[in-house]
Image: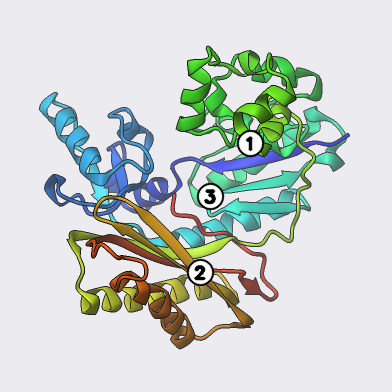
Amino acid sequence: MRIVGHLDMDAFFAAIEERENPSLRGLPIVVGADPRGGKGRGVVSTANYKAREYGIHSALPISKAWRLSEAAKRQGRPPARFLPVRMERYAEVSAHVMETLRRFVFLVEPASIDEAYFDLSSCESYRLAEEVCRKMKCAIGDEEHLTASVGIGPNKLVAKIASGLRKPDGLTVVREGEVASFLAPLPVRTIPGIGPKTEAELARVGVKTVKDMRSFSQQELRGMFGKRGGDLYEKVRGRDESPVEETYEAKSVGEQETFEQDTGDSSFLTERLRAMSEDVMRRATAEGFTHFRTVVLTVRFADFETKSRSHTLSVPTNSLAVLQREAMNLLAPFLDDRENPLGKLIRLIGVRVEKLEQFGVHPQALLIE
């Protein structure tokens, strides 16, 4: 019998801030860019559940989050507290949480800084798997003073969906024979890989729930979504054969910055890129990553057109100088007509490293929430 668990920390960044600053307890908390009185240009990284009551959520423009907070304030509700991202601290707490997981289960696959899959098959029953997860959640609460939501299912797909249904501090068990009925009433957006555009396409043909989507054949879904349609056909039926793998490889460690004013100033852009590269190396080193091979640069223009370019080195390196050099080489074409023939101003740049390596330490993936 295969049994898989998925742990998802609740509003992780905001929960850490509230834990470490008692004066924040009970208040709506937003972790992300500086709102600058509604003129900030970044996004929300995490919002706690109080802030979510205002409509504030991850990836929301920080300026809109500020306006929602101000609207709540006018209604006599407490305004949100806006806090900067402290990624190194969050990564440190994440490492502690993963260590706690490994005391209860043998095989753990970190999926991001605040979530992980783990194999519960050795429990040989869902009853015992649930008991193990309850003890795991209690240990995280006692040791870290944080809550986590856990899903248990016959595969990674079902476990992940289950972990998100009863947040915060939830525990949802879906046995193998219950998968079809569990998924049927859920909105299609619940299925990983279905974003707002796909959701809108499906809504146009009257598909709103997983059950609705099951009425399409595999061929029909391939016709609608190409190769991805075959994958969606399997997912809406709760099928997933992907293994839980301890040798998880972090996809990337990166930083990005949205500028207060759109700019074409090459000196300013190169200075910010150098500083971001230093931050990336600091974060990677803090997580025990020793080498990288790929450098990726992202540029977003003032009209929101976004382009990414990358370069993979012939051999891995841990050199900041190499990272900065490669990042500059990737940026240069955006400062002339090779990548920017219309001379558009730049709104955002980001740099990240991929193909990460580490020795003697379990990888902990870093994602900006």
Q: Which residue is mark 2?
A: 310
Q: 310 or 16, which lies in front?
A: 310
Q: Are marks 2 and 3 in contact (CB under 8 Å)?
A: no
- Assess whether mark 1 and mark 3 are in contact (beta carbons under 8 angstroms): no
Q: Badge 3 local density, few (<14 within 10 Å), some, or many (20+)?
A: many
Residue type marked 1: Lys
Q: Nearer the viewer, mark 3 or mark 1?
A: 1
Residue 259: image location, x then y, percent: 23, 61
- Does label 1 or label 2 sit earlier along the sequence? 1
Q: Give how far apart the Cα atoms at labels 2 and 3 are.
A: 27 Å
Residue 259 horizontal side relative to residue 171, left or right:
left
Q: CA distance from mark 1 to mark 2?
A: 31 Å
Q: Which mark is residue 160?
A: 1
Q: Identify the residue position indicated by label 3 in the image.
A: 114
* Residue 100 location (% of width, % of height): 64, 53
Q: Earlier in the sequence, mark 3 or mark 1?
A: 3
Check contact, mark 1 vs mark 2: CB within 8 A: no
Residue sitting at 36 percent across and 71 percent down?
Answer: 338
Residue 65, relative to residue 345: is it above or below? Answer: above
297 above or below 64? Answer: below
**Which comes sooner in the sequence, label 2 or label 3?**
3
Name the residue located 40 percent from the left edge and 75 percent from the top edge: 277
**On the image, which quarter does residue 78 sit in?**
top left
Amino acid under disc 3? Asp
Foreground: disc 2 or disc 3? 2
What secondary structure is found at the residue carrying circle 2? strand
The residue lying toward the viewer, choosing from 306 and 61, is 306
**Kind of residue indicated by mark 2:** Ser
Of residues 103 and 175, the one drawn nearer to the viewer in this rendering: 175
